[in-house]
Image (cartoon, rainbow, N blue to C red):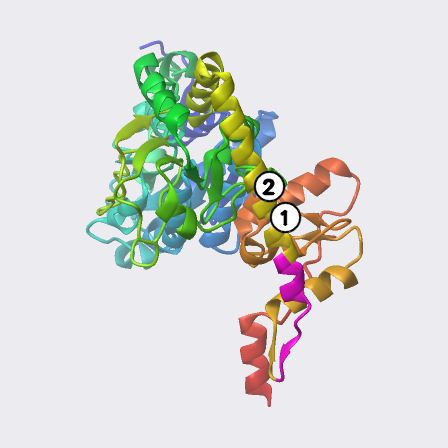
Protein backbone atom coordinates (compact mmCIF):
# COMPACT_ATOMS: atom_id res chain seq x y z
CA UNK A 1 0.00 0.00 0.00
CA UNK A 2 1.31 3.47 -0.93
CA UNK A 3 1.24 5.62 2.21
CA UNK A 4 0.79 8.70 0.04
CA UNK A 5 -2.27 7.28 -1.73
CA UNK A 6 -5.48 9.19 -1.06
CA UNK A 7 -8.09 7.51 1.10
CA UNK A 8 -11.80 8.24 1.05
CA UNK A 9 -14.94 6.88 2.60
CA UNK A 10 -17.03 4.24 0.86
CA UNK A 11 -19.74 6.90 0.61
CA UNK A 12 -17.32 9.00 -1.48
CA UNK A 13 -16.76 6.12 -3.90
CA UNK A 14 -20.48 5.33 -3.88
CA UNK A 15 -21.20 8.89 -5.05
CA UNK A 16 -18.50 8.58 -7.70
CA UNK A 17 -20.15 5.37 -8.84
CA UNK A 18 -23.51 7.10 -9.24
CA UNK A 19 -21.76 9.70 -11.42
CA UNK A 20 -20.21 6.97 -13.55
CA UNK A 21 -23.65 5.45 -14.12
CA UNK A 22 -24.67 8.75 -15.74
CA UNK A 23 -27.44 9.59 -13.29
CA UNK A 24 -28.74 13.13 -13.66
CA UNK A 25 -30.91 13.11 -10.55
CA UNK A 26 -31.37 11.44 -7.19
CA UNK A 27 -34.94 11.73 -5.92
CA UNK A 28 -34.53 11.56 -2.17
CA UNK A 29 -36.31 11.21 1.15
CA UNK A 30 -33.31 11.13 3.46
CA UNK A 31 -32.89 9.61 6.92
CA UNK A 32 -30.10 9.01 9.41
CA UNK A 33 -28.87 6.11 7.28
CA UNK A 34 -27.77 8.59 4.58
CA UNK A 35 -25.53 10.75 6.78
CA UNK A 36 -22.25 9.47 5.23
CA UNK A 37 -23.61 10.08 1.73
CA UNK A 38 -24.78 13.59 2.64
CA UNK A 39 -21.28 14.33 3.96
CA UNK A 40 -19.79 13.05 0.70
CA UNK A 41 -22.18 15.28 -1.26
CA UNK A 42 -21.08 18.28 0.78
CA UNK A 43 -17.44 17.42 0.11
CA UNK A 44 -18.12 17.12 -3.63
CA UNK A 45 -19.88 20.47 -3.59
CA UNK A 46 -16.97 22.18 -1.81
CA UNK A 47 -14.55 20.74 -4.35
CA UNK A 48 -16.72 21.80 -7.30
CA UNK A 49 -17.12 18.19 -8.46
CA UNK A 50 -20.02 17.01 -10.58
CA UNK A 51 -22.63 14.80 -8.96
CA UNK A 52 -26.28 13.93 -9.58
CA UNK A 53 -28.66 16.73 -8.58
CA UNK A 54 -30.71 15.87 -5.50
CA UNK A 55 -34.46 16.47 -5.51
CA UNK A 56 -35.91 16.34 -2.00
CA UNK A 57 -39.34 14.68 -2.01
CA UNK A 58 -41.81 14.83 0.89
CA UNK A 59 -42.95 11.25 0.28
CA UNK A 60 -41.27 8.19 -1.19
CA UNK A 61 -44.20 7.49 -3.50
CA UNK A 62 -43.58 10.89 -5.09
CA UNK A 63 -39.84 10.27 -5.35
CA UNK A 64 -40.18 6.96 -7.18
CA UNK A 65 -42.83 8.28 -9.55
CA UNK A 66 -40.73 11.38 -10.34
CA UNK A 67 -37.85 9.08 -11.27
CA UNK A 68 -40.26 7.08 -13.42
CA UNK A 69 -41.47 10.19 -15.22
CA UNK A 70 -37.90 11.23 -15.96
CA UNK A 71 -37.12 7.75 -17.29
CA UNK A 72 -40.18 7.84 -19.56
CA UNK A 73 -39.23 11.29 -20.88
CA UNK A 74 -35.51 10.62 -21.40
CA UNK A 75 -35.17 6.85 -21.70
CA UNK A 76 -32.66 6.82 -18.80
CA UNK A 77 -33.39 5.34 -15.39
CA UNK A 78 -32.47 7.38 -12.31
CA UNK A 79 -31.80 6.83 -8.63
CA UNK A 80 -34.09 7.10 -5.60
CA UNK A 81 -32.89 7.18 -2.00
CA UNK A 82 -35.25 6.33 0.84
CA UNK A 83 -34.99 5.66 4.57
CA UNK A 84 -34.58 2.06 5.78
CA UNK A 85 -37.66 -0.20 6.03
CA UNK A 86 -40.16 2.65 6.46
CA UNK A 87 -39.12 4.42 3.28
CA UNK A 88 -38.97 1.11 1.43
CA UNK A 89 -42.54 0.36 2.49
CA UNK A 90 -43.69 3.77 1.32
CA UNK A 91 -42.06 3.05 -2.06
CA UNK A 92 -43.73 -0.31 -2.59
CA UNK A 93 -46.87 0.85 -4.42
CA UNK A 94 -44.82 3.01 -6.76
CA UNK A 95 -42.48 0.10 -7.50
CA UNK A 96 -45.55 -1.97 -8.35
CA UNK A 97 -46.39 0.57 -11.06
CA UNK A 98 -42.82 0.69 -12.39
CA UNK A 99 -42.51 -3.08 -12.39
CA UNK A 100 -45.65 -3.54 -14.48
CA UNK A 101 -44.70 -0.67 -16.81
CA UNK A 102 -41.10 -1.96 -17.11
CA UNK A 103 -39.55 1.35 -16.11
CA UNK A 104 -35.97 1.27 -14.78
CA UNK A 105 -35.10 2.80 -11.42
CA UNK A 106 -32.47 2.13 -8.76
CA UNK A 107 -34.12 2.26 -5.33
CA UNK A 108 -31.51 2.64 -2.58
CA UNK A 109 -32.27 2.36 1.12
CA UNK A 110 -30.18 2.28 4.25
CA UNK A 111 -30.47 -0.43 6.85
CA UNK A 112 -30.19 -0.09 10.60
CA UNK A 113 -26.56 -0.06 11.79
CA UNK A 114 -25.38 -3.46 13.00
CA UNK A 115 -23.12 -2.30 15.83
CA UNK A 116 -24.61 -1.12 19.12
CA UNK A 117 -21.85 0.07 21.47
CA UNK A 118 -19.67 2.26 19.32
CA UNK A 119 -17.49 -0.52 17.91
CA UNK A 120 -17.46 1.09 14.43
CA UNK A 121 -18.03 4.50 12.98
CA UNK A 122 -21.74 4.74 12.11
CA UNK A 123 -22.92 2.66 15.08
CA UNK A 124 -26.46 2.85 16.45
CA UNK A 125 -27.04 6.15 18.20
CA UNK A 126 -30.79 6.78 18.18
CA UNK A 127 -34.07 5.06 18.96
CA UNK A 128 -35.09 4.30 15.37
CA UNK A 129 -31.91 2.31 14.77
CA UNK A 130 -33.41 -0.40 16.99
CA UNK A 131 -37.04 -0.38 15.90
CA UNK A 132 -36.52 -0.03 12.14
CA UNK A 133 -34.72 -3.30 11.52
CA UNK A 134 -36.94 -6.08 10.14
CA UNK A 135 -35.68 -9.59 9.51
CA UNK A 136 -36.00 -9.25 5.72
CA UNK A 137 -36.19 -5.64 4.56
CA UNK A 138 -35.91 -6.48 0.87
CA UNK A 139 -39.02 -8.66 1.07
CA UNK A 140 -41.12 -5.48 1.18
CA UNK A 141 -40.44 -4.80 -2.51
CA UNK A 142 -39.13 -8.17 -3.72
CA UNK A 143 -42.21 -8.96 -5.88
CA UNK A 144 -41.62 -5.78 -7.88
CA UNK A 145 -37.86 -5.80 -8.44
CA UNK A 146 -35.61 -7.56 -10.92
CA UNK A 147 -32.64 -7.68 -8.54
CA UNK A 148 -31.76 -6.94 -4.92
CA UNK A 149 -28.47 -6.63 -3.09
CA UNK A 150 -27.17 -5.65 0.33
CA UNK A 151 -23.78 -3.95 -0.01
CA UNK A 152 -21.41 -6.07 2.15
CA UNK A 153 -18.27 -3.94 1.86
CA UNK A 154 -17.42 -0.45 0.61
CA UNK A 155 -14.59 -1.62 -1.62
CA UNK A 156 -17.09 -3.04 -4.14
CA UNK A 157 -19.47 -0.06 -4.10
CA UNK A 158 -18.85 0.82 -7.76
CA UNK A 159 -19.04 -2.81 -8.85
CA UNK A 160 -22.39 -3.29 -7.11
CA UNK A 161 -23.76 -0.07 -8.59
CA UNK A 162 -22.76 -1.10 -12.10
CA UNK A 163 -24.44 -4.47 -11.63
CA UNK A 164 -27.62 -2.76 -10.42
CA UNK A 165 -27.63 -0.41 -13.41
CA UNK A 166 -26.94 -3.21 -15.90
CA UNK A 167 -29.86 -5.25 -14.60
CA UNK A 168 -32.34 -2.38 -14.46
CA UNK A 169 -31.49 -1.17 -17.98
CA UNK A 170 -31.43 -4.63 -19.60
CA UNK A 171 -34.57 -5.65 -21.48
CA UNK A 172 -37.14 -6.03 -20.15
CA UNK A 173 -36.24 -3.08 -17.97
CA UNK A 174 -37.45 -2.61 -14.42
CA UNK A 175 -36.73 -1.56 -10.83
CA UNK A 176 -33.80 -2.84 -8.77
CA UNK A 177 -33.13 -2.47 -5.04
CA UNK A 178 -29.91 -1.93 -3.09
CA UNK A 179 -29.39 -1.54 0.65
CA UNK A 180 -26.39 -0.44 2.74
CA UNK A 181 -25.51 0.20 6.38
CA UNK A 182 -23.76 3.22 7.85
CA UNK A 183 -20.76 1.17 9.01
CA UNK A 184 -20.18 0.13 5.39
CA UNK A 185 -20.47 3.68 4.02
CA UNK A 186 -18.03 5.07 6.60
CA UNK A 187 -15.26 2.58 5.78
CA UNK A 188 -12.11 4.21 4.39
CA UNK A 189 -10.38 2.79 1.34
CA UNK A 190 -7.33 3.68 -0.73
CA UNK A 191 -8.13 4.97 -4.21
CA UNK A 192 -6.06 2.16 -5.71
CA UNK A 193 -8.38 -0.46 -4.22
CA UNK A 194 -11.40 0.92 -6.06
CA UNK A 195 -12.00 -0.18 -9.65
CA UNK A 196 -14.12 1.37 -12.39
CA UNK A 197 -16.75 -0.56 -14.33
CA UNK A 198 -17.48 1.39 -17.56
CA UNK A 199 -20.70 0.79 -19.49
CA UNK A 200 -18.88 -0.21 -22.67
CA UNK A 201 -17.53 -3.28 -20.87
CA UNK A 202 -20.19 -3.97 -18.27
CA UNK A 203 -23.35 -2.40 -19.71
CA UNK A 204 -26.92 -3.47 -20.23
CA UNK A 205 -28.25 -6.08 -22.66
CA UNK A 206 -30.70 -4.78 -25.27
CA UNK A 207 -33.42 -6.92 -26.84
CA UNK A 208 -32.83 -7.84 -30.47
CA UNK A 209 -34.70 -9.23 -33.43
CA UNK A 210 -35.52 -12.89 -34.08
CA UNK A 211 -34.45 -15.47 -36.65
CA UNK A 212 -35.51 -15.18 -40.28
CA UNK A 213 -37.43 -18.47 -40.20
CA UNK A 214 -39.76 -17.18 -37.47
CA UNK A 215 -40.39 -13.93 -39.35
CA UNK A 216 -41.12 -15.93 -42.51
CA UNK A 217 -43.58 -18.19 -40.67
CA UNK A 218 -45.48 -15.18 -39.34
CA UNK A 219 -45.47 -13.52 -42.76
CA UNK A 220 -46.92 -16.70 -44.32
CA UNK A 221 -49.86 -16.59 -41.90
CA UNK A 222 -50.53 -12.88 -42.54
CA UNK A 223 -50.37 -13.32 -46.32
CA UNK A 224 -53.21 -15.85 -46.08
CA UNK A 225 -55.21 -14.03 -43.38
CA UNK A 226 -58.67 -12.65 -44.05
CA UNK A 227 -59.37 -10.98 -40.68
CA UNK A 228 -56.00 -10.21 -39.03
CA UNK A 229 -56.01 -8.56 -35.60
CA UNK A 230 -53.18 -6.98 -33.61
CA UNK A 231 -53.53 -6.07 -29.92
CA UNK A 232 -50.95 -3.93 -28.14
CA UNK A 233 -50.46 -1.88 -24.97
CA UNK A 234 -46.85 -0.73 -24.74
CA UNK A 235 -45.12 -1.17 -28.12
CA UNK A 236 -45.04 2.62 -28.28
CA UNK A 237 -42.48 2.78 -25.46
CA UNK A 238 -40.09 3.04 -28.41
CA UNK A 239 -41.53 6.03 -30.26
CA UNK A 240 -40.11 4.79 -33.56
CA UNK A 241 -42.34 1.70 -33.36
CA UNK A 242 -45.50 3.81 -33.78
CA UNK A 243 -44.72 4.63 -37.42
CA UNK A 244 -43.59 1.08 -38.19
CA UNK A 245 -46.77 -0.40 -36.75
CA UNK A 246 -48.91 2.06 -38.70
CA UNK A 247 -47.14 1.21 -41.96
CA UNK A 248 -47.42 -2.52 -41.29
CA UNK A 249 -51.14 -2.27 -40.47
CA UNK A 250 -51.87 -0.23 -43.58
CA UNK A 251 -49.84 -2.51 -45.85
CA UNK A 252 -51.30 -5.77 -44.53
CA UNK A 253 -54.80 -4.52 -43.66
CA UNK A 254 -54.52 -5.33 -39.95
CA UNK A 255 -57.00 -4.08 -37.38
CA UNK A 256 -55.05 -2.67 -34.39
CA UNK A 257 -56.63 -2.47 -30.95
CA UNK A 258 -55.01 -0.71 -27.99
CA UNK A 259 -56.26 -2.48 -24.89
CA UNK A 260 -55.41 -0.65 -21.64
CA UNK A 261 -52.56 1.17 -23.40
CA UNK A 262 -49.55 2.51 -21.51
CA UNK A 263 -48.26 4.50 -24.48
CA UNK A 264 -49.46 5.80 -27.83
CA UNK A 265 -48.94 2.75 -30.02
CA UNK A 266 -50.74 3.80 -33.22
CA UNK A 267 -51.92 7.23 -34.41
CA UNK A 268 -55.58 7.53 -33.55
CA UNK A 269 -56.33 8.92 -36.99
CA UNK A 270 -54.90 5.82 -38.63
CA UNK A 271 -57.55 4.02 -40.71
CA UNK A 272 -56.44 0.78 -39.07
CA UNK A 273 -57.08 1.92 -35.49
CA UNK A 274 -59.79 -0.42 -34.24
CA UNK A 275 -60.51 1.25 -30.93
CA UNK A 276 -59.73 0.21 -27.39
CA UNK A 277 -61.57 -3.07 -26.88
CA UNK A 278 -61.04 -6.19 -28.98
CA UNK A 279 -64.29 -8.00 -28.09
CA UNK A 280 -66.01 -8.25 -31.51
CA UNK A 281 -62.80 -8.55 -33.53
CA UNK A 282 -61.51 -11.18 -31.12
CA UNK A 283 -64.31 -13.57 -32.01
CA UNK A 284 -63.84 -13.02 -35.76
CA UNK A 285 -60.04 -12.98 -36.17
CA UNK A 286 -58.36 -15.81 -38.05
CA UNK A 287 -54.80 -14.58 -37.38
CA UNK A 288 -53.87 -12.55 -34.31
CA UNK A 289 -50.76 -10.78 -33.04
CA UNK A 290 -50.13 -9.94 -29.39
CA UNK A 291 -47.51 -7.19 -29.51
CA UNK A 292 -46.11 -5.91 -26.21
CA UNK A 293 -49.25 -6.44 -24.18
CA UNK A 294 -49.73 -7.97 -20.73
CA UNK A 295 -53.51 -8.39 -20.73
CA UNK A 296 -54.83 -8.51 -24.32
CA UNK A 297 -58.43 -9.15 -23.29
CA UNK A 298 -60.51 -10.26 -20.32
CA UNK A 299 -61.34 -13.94 -20.99
CA UNK A 300 -64.45 -13.99 -18.78
CA UNK A 301 -65.94 -11.06 -20.73
CA UNK A 302 -64.43 -11.52 -24.18
CA UNK A 303 -64.17 -15.16 -25.24
CA UNK A 304 -61.62 -15.71 -27.98
CA UNK A 305 -61.97 -17.86 -31.06
CA UNK A 306 -60.25 -21.23 -30.50
CA UNK A 307 -59.55 -21.43 -34.23
CA UNK A 308 -57.49 -18.21 -34.28
CA UNK A 309 -53.76 -18.65 -34.89
CA UNK A 310 -51.82 -16.36 -32.54
CA UNK A 311 -48.31 -14.95 -32.65
CA UNK A 312 -46.82 -13.17 -29.64
CA UNK A 313 -44.19 -10.47 -30.18
CA UNK A 314 -43.06 -9.13 -26.84
CA UNK A 315 -40.10 -7.73 -24.96
CA UNK A 316 -41.30 -10.00 -22.16
CA UNK A 317 -43.05 -12.96 -23.75
CA UNK A 318 -42.45 -15.23 -20.78
CA UNK A 319 -44.32 -12.93 -18.35
CA UNK A 320 -42.24 -14.31 -15.51
CA UNK A 321 -43.65 -11.80 -13.02
CA UNK A 322 -47.20 -13.09 -13.61
CA UNK A 323 -47.91 -16.25 -11.58
CA UNK A 324 -50.76 -17.09 -13.98
CA UNK A 325 -50.64 -16.07 -17.65
CA UNK A 326 -52.34 -18.33 -20.19
CA UNK A 327 -53.10 -16.30 -23.29
CA UNK A 328 -52.56 -18.24 -26.53
CA UNK A 329 -49.43 -18.10 -28.63
CA UNK A 330 -48.79 -20.54 -31.45
CA UNK A 331 -45.58 -18.66 -32.19
CA UNK A 332 -43.82 -16.75 -29.41
CA UNK A 333 -41.15 -14.24 -30.42
CA UNK A 334 -39.23 -12.67 -27.56
CA UNK A 335 -37.41 -9.51 -28.62
CA UNK A 336 -37.57 -5.89 -29.67
CA UNK A 337 -40.94 -5.29 -31.32
CA UNK A 338 -39.57 -2.41 -33.41
CA UNK A 339 -37.00 -4.64 -35.07
CA UNK A 340 -39.34 -7.61 -35.38
CA UNK A 341 -42.20 -5.59 -36.93
CA UNK A 342 -39.78 -3.80 -39.29
CA UNK A 343 -38.37 -7.17 -40.43
CA UNK A 344 -41.90 -8.55 -40.82
CA UNK A 345 -42.92 -5.57 -42.96
CA UNK A 346 -39.88 -6.03 -45.19
CA UNK A 347 -40.67 -9.72 -45.74
CA UNK A 348 -44.33 -8.99 -46.47
CA UNK A 349 -43.38 -6.37 -49.06
CA UNK A 350 -41.00 -8.81 -50.71
CA UNK A 351 -43.52 -11.66 -50.83
CA UNK A 352 -46.81 -9.84 -51.40
CA UNK A 353 -48.49 -10.18 -54.78
CA UNK A 354 -51.14 -8.00 -56.40
CA UNK A 355 -53.92 -10.15 -54.97
CA UNK A 356 -52.72 -9.69 -51.40
CA UNK A 357 -52.29 -5.94 -51.83
CA UNK A 358 -55.82 -5.66 -53.22
CA UNK A 359 -57.34 -7.64 -50.34
CA UNK A 360 -55.36 -5.63 -47.78
CA UNK A 361 -56.47 -2.35 -49.33
CA UNK A 362 -60.09 -3.47 -49.14
CA UNK A 363 -59.66 -4.30 -45.44
CA UNK A 364 -58.09 -0.90 -44.76
CA UNK A 365 -60.98 0.85 -46.53
CA UNK A 366 -63.47 -1.16 -44.46
CA UNK A 367 -61.63 -0.34 -41.22
CA UNK A 368 -61.61 3.35 -42.16
CA UNK A 369 -65.38 3.26 -42.74
CA UNK A 370 -65.84 1.60 -39.35
CA UNK A 371 -63.77 4.35 -37.72
CA UNK A 372 -65.89 7.05 -39.35
CA UNK A 373 -69.04 5.27 -38.24
CA UNK A 374 -67.74 5.15 -34.64
CA UNK A 375 -67.10 8.89 -34.68
CA UNK A 376 -70.54 9.63 -36.16
CA UNK A 377 -72.16 7.44 -33.53
CA UNK A 378 -70.10 9.16 -30.84
CA UNK A 379 -71.39 12.54 -32.01
CA UNK A 380 -74.98 11.29 -31.90
CA UNK A 381 -74.49 9.86 -28.44
CA UNK A 382 -72.97 13.16 -27.29
CA UNK A 383 -76.13 15.01 -28.29
CA UNK A 384 -78.09 13.11 -25.62
CA UNK A 385 -77.98 15.15 -22.38
CA UNK A 386 -78.97 12.19 -20.23
CA UNK A 387 -81.75 12.13 -17.66
CA UNK A 388 -82.38 14.32 -14.60
CA UNK A 389 -79.84 13.44 -11.92
CA UNK A 390 -77.62 11.51 -14.33
CA UNK A 391 -75.79 13.52 -16.97
CA UNK A 392 -74.50 11.68 -20.01
CA UNK A 393 -70.67 11.48 -19.91
CA UNK A 394 -70.61 11.77 -23.70
CA UNK A 395 -72.62 15.01 -23.55
CA UNK A 396 -70.42 16.29 -20.71
CA UNK A 397 -67.20 15.64 -22.64
CA UNK A 398 -68.55 17.21 -25.82
CA UNK A 399 -69.76 20.29 -23.94
CA UNK A 400 -66.43 20.68 -22.16
CA UNK A 401 -64.62 20.43 -25.49
CA UNK A 402 -66.65 23.35 -26.81
CA UNK A 403 -66.00 25.43 -23.67
CA UNK A 404 -62.27 24.80 -23.42
CA UNK A 405 -59.74 27.36 -24.53
CA UNK A 406 -58.27 26.31 -27.90
CA UNK A 407 -54.80 26.12 -26.32
CA UNK A 408 -55.95 23.64 -23.65
CA UNK A 409 -54.23 20.27 -23.46
CA UNK A 410 -56.67 17.47 -22.68
CA UNK A 411 -55.63 14.43 -20.65
CA UNK A 412 -57.14 11.95 -18.20
CA UNK A 413 -58.14 8.27 -18.07
CA UNK A 414 -61.62 9.01 -19.46
CA UNK A 415 -59.98 9.57 -22.86
CA UNK A 416 -59.68 5.79 -23.16
CA UNK A 417 -63.46 5.79 -23.73
CA UNK A 418 -64.23 9.30 -24.96
CA UNK A 419 -61.20 10.22 -27.09
CA UNK A 420 -63.28 10.65 -30.22
CA UNK A 421 -65.35 13.39 -28.54
CA UNK A 422 -62.32 15.71 -28.34
CA UNK A 423 -61.75 17.38 -31.69
CA UNK A 424 -59.65 20.19 -33.14
CA UNK A 425 -58.47 22.74 -32.17
CA UNK A 426 -57.98 21.11 -28.78
CA UNK A 427 -54.86 19.05 -28.32
CA UNK A 428 -55.02 15.62 -26.74
CA UNK A 429 -51.97 14.80 -24.66
CA UNK A 430 -49.73 11.88 -25.52
CA UNK A 431 -51.48 8.74 -24.30
CA UNK A 432 -48.66 8.09 -21.82
CA UNK A 433 -49.86 11.22 -19.99
CA UNK A 434 -53.57 10.39 -19.84
CA UNK A 435 -53.32 8.99 -16.31
CA UNK A 436 -52.29 12.09 -14.33
CA UNK A 437 -50.07 10.42 -11.79
CA UNK A 438 -46.71 11.84 -10.82
CA UNK A 439 -44.81 9.79 -13.41
CA UNK A 440 -47.14 11.13 -16.14
CA UNK A 441 -47.12 14.77 -15.04
CA UNK A 442 -43.32 15.05 -14.88
CA UNK A 443 -42.84 14.51 -18.67
CA UNK A 444 -45.58 17.09 -19.30
CA UNK A 445 -43.76 19.60 -17.14
CA UNK A 446 -40.48 18.83 -18.91
CA UNK A 447 -42.16 19.34 -22.28
CA UNK A 448 -43.46 22.76 -21.25
CA UNK A 449 -40.15 23.77 -19.69
CA UNK A 450 -38.21 22.86 -22.84
CA UNK A 451 -40.66 24.80 -24.97
CA UNK A 452 -40.34 27.92 -22.78
CA UNK A 453 -37.36 27.55 -20.41
CA UNK A 454 -37.76 31.02 -18.88
CA UNK A 455 -41.29 30.44 -17.59
CA UNK A 456 -41.96 29.75 -13.94
CA UNK A 457 -41.67 26.06 -13.05
CA UNK A 458 -44.98 25.99 -11.20
CA UNK A 459 -47.34 27.68 -13.69
CA UNK A 460 -48.92 24.37 -14.76
CA UNK A 461 -52.39 24.47 -13.21
CA UNK A 462 -54.62 21.40 -13.61
CA UNK A 463 -58.35 22.02 -14.04
CA UNK A 464 -60.34 19.29 -12.30
CA UNK A 465 -63.95 18.45 -13.05
CA UNK A 466 -64.53 18.02 -9.31
CA UNK A 467 -62.50 18.53 -6.13
CA UNK A 468 -60.10 15.84 -5.01
CA UNK A 469 -61.39 13.12 -2.67
CA UNK A 470 -59.45 14.71 0.20
CA UNK A 471 -61.08 18.09 -0.45
CA UNK A 472 -64.55 16.55 -0.64
CA UNK A 473 -63.98 14.70 2.63
CA UNK A 474 -62.77 17.84 4.35
CA UNK A 475 -65.76 19.81 3.05
CA UNK A 476 -68.11 17.16 4.45
CA UNK A 477 -66.44 17.38 7.87
CA UNK A 478 -66.69 21.16 7.88
CA UNK A 479 -70.48 21.09 7.42
Q: Nearer the viewer, residue 5 or 344?
A: 344
Q: Which residue is mark 2?
A: 368
Q: Is residue 136 magenta-colored?
A: no
Residue located at (30% from left, 14% from top):
213
Residue located at (25% from left, 53% from top):
133
Q: Count how many numbered circles sit on residues in the image.
A: 2
Q: Nearer the viewer, residue 183 or 117?
A: 183
Q: Which mark is residue 207?
A: none
Q: Is residue 382 magenta-colored?
A: yes
Residue 61 placement (x, y as % from top left) = 46, 53
Residue 243 placement (x, y as % from top left) = 57, 28
Mark 1 and mark 2: Cα distance apart in space: 6 Å
Q: Secondary structure at mark 2?
A: helix
Q: Nearer the viewer, residue 427 or 60?
A: 427
Q: Which mark is residue 372?
A: 1
Report the quarter where the C terminus lies. Answer: bottom right
Q: Nearer the viewer, residue 214 or 198?
A: 214
> Furthest residue to the front?
355
Q: Secondary structure at mark 1?
A: helix
What span is colored magenta in the figure? 377-388
Residue 44 placement (x, y as % from top left) = 54, 29
> Furthest residue to the bottom?
479
Tell me whether the residue at label 1 lies in contact with that at label 2, contact meaning CB atoms closer than 8 angstroms: yes
Q: Quadrant of residue 452?
A: top right
Q: Residues within 10 Å of mark 2 (few under 14, many from 20)?
A: some
In this orientation, does residue 293 appear? yes
When the figure is inspected, residue 374 is found, relative to residue 198, above or below; the finding is below
Report the quarter where the N terminus lies. Answer: top left
Amino acid sequence: MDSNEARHSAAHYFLEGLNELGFDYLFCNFGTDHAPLIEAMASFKRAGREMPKTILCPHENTAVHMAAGYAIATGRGQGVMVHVDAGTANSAMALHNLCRARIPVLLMAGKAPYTTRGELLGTRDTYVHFVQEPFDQASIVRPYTKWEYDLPCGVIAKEALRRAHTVMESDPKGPVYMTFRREILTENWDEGAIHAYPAERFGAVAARGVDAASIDALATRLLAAERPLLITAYSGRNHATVAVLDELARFAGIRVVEFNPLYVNLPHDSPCHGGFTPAKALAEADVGLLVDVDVPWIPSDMPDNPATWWAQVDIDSEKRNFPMWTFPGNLRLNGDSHRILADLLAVLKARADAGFESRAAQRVAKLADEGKARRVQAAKTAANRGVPGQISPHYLCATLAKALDPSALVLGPALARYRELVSAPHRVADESLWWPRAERVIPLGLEQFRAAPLREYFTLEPLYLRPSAAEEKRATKDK
